[in-house]
Amino acid sequence: MSLPLKQLQSILYRLITAASGVAEGLAAEKRLVAEGGMPAGGLDALVLGDDRLSAEDRVDIYANMYFYRLLDVLKEDFPATFGCSATTIFIISRPAICSIIHRPSRR
């Protein structure tokens, strides 16, 4: 299956930045099949899986690394915030990080 690059990038971005992981992103994308989002073959039509890793597992590796890179950036930019245990618990959660990505400050 061949998609325009912009559409492929958009799908992968949504999967990688889904708040609860790639599985949640895939569930949302399945609803978009009829609207021309995810192709009919699903993620397997876009990402090659094999006996070792499925297509979803491969994208999940990128999603996890994206999350941990963002976490490292936040730790570096806001060290005092990470010194507070209650705040650290909030910030370390993937849904919290993803909510920051999807709802950035407008100030």
Image (spheres, grey):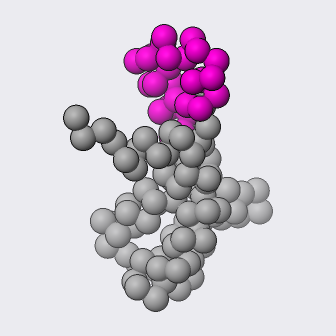
The answer to whether residue 59 is left or right of residue 80 is right
Which span is picked out in magenta? 66-91
Q: Residue at x 44, y 17 (%)?
A: 78
**65 to 7, vertically: above or below:** above
In the rendered image, residue 81, in percent from the top left (x then y), is placed at 50, 17
In the rendered image, residue 56, in percent from the top left (x then y), is placed at 64, 61
Q: Quadrant of residue 48?
A: bottom right
> Nearest the camera: 70 or 65?
70
Residue reaching furthest to the front: 86
Reply yes or no: does residue 35 show up in magenta.
Answer: no
Query: What secondary structure prevails in the magenta region?
Result: helix
Residue reaching furthest to the bottom: 34
Q: Residue at x 64, y 28 (%)?
A: 89
In the rendered image, residue 77, in percent from the top left (x then y), is placed at 40, 18
Q: Quadrant of the C terminus?
A: top left
The reply to whether residue 77 is in sight is yes
Residue reaching furthest to the left: 107
Q: Quadrant of residue 55?
A: bottom right
Reply yes or no: does residue 67 show up in magenta.
Answer: yes
**78 to 32, vertically: above or below:** above
In the rendered image, residue 23, in percent from the top left (x then y), is placed at 65, 62
Q: Residue at x 53, y 55 (%)?
A: 18
The answer to whether residue 12 is left or right of residue 59 is left
Q: How many marks?
A: 0
The reply to whether residue 58 is in sight is no
**34 to 67, vertically: above or below:** below
> Nearest the camera: 86 or 39?
86
